[in-house]
Amino acid sequence: MHFRSMTEAKLTFAPINLDAAAAIAITFRADSFVCSFGSDERFYESDGKGHERYLGWLQNLMQSMPGSCVHVWQGDTIIGQIEMNRFKSQPEIAYVNLFYLAPAYRNRGLGHYLDQYAMTYFADLGFQSARLSVSPTNLQATRFYRKNGWRDLGPQLGHAEVHLMQKQIEQEYH
């Protein structure tokens, strides 16, 4: 379910296999904290066990929303990851927890395919809009989101260090 291929970019999106690729998922998620906040300390947390809690959260999310957490493959290499959910305080709105491409695959136009995959996934579930959080200091991500139709809603309530962005899910994805 939710195996999709973007042939023009030679990308395949397949559910994360935690038995085979938990270490990759952890590495990607930790690096996303470095990109956003300059350090992975917040990911690992003060007790150093944040990655274990993350794997439990990821497993629960994948069970509750099949297809919501995928690795992005180019050939036989995992080059990225997407984590999708519902917006906690408004479950009728979709939420992207993570768009991630490994550093060697950034700035190649591949991010558009991750966004397209997420919007199609959400449209298939009947969502009309999606949100995500971004650190305003992560200029590369902020530019990418704006270029792909996301609009900045300002600082997230209770988390001034990140901005909330929103995108309408266009009919083309339905």
Image (cartoon, grey):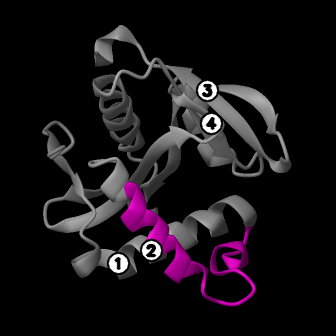
Tell me, for residue 106, which label it has, or none: none
Q: Is there CB contact under 8 Å for labels 2 and 1?
A: yes
Q: Residue at x 55, y 37 (%)?
A: 144
Magenta range? 38-61
- Give how far apart the Cα atoms at labels 4 and 3 are: 14 Å
Task: Categorize mark 4 by other alpha carbons within 10 Å: few (<14), some (14-19), many (20+).
Answer: few
Q: Which mark is residue 22?
A: 1
Residue at figure coordinates x 28%, y 63% from the top left: 16
First reached walking from the N terminus: tag 1 or tag 3 = 1
Magenta stretch mostly in which secondary structure? helix
Quickly name the residue at label 3. Answer: 166
Numbered disc 2: secondary structure: helix
How far apart marks 3 and 2 lie (CA) works out to 26 Å
Amino acid residing under circle 2: Leu
Left or right relative to 79: residue 35: right
Instruction: Compare marks 3 and 2 and give the one earlier in the sequence.
Output: 2
- Is residue 117 something that shows in the picture? yes
CA distance separating discs 1 and 3 = 29 Å
Type of the residue with mark 1 = Ala
How far apart in space, not on screen, are marks 2 and 1 (Cα)?
7 Å
> Which of pointers 1 and 4 lies earlier in the amino acid sequence?
1
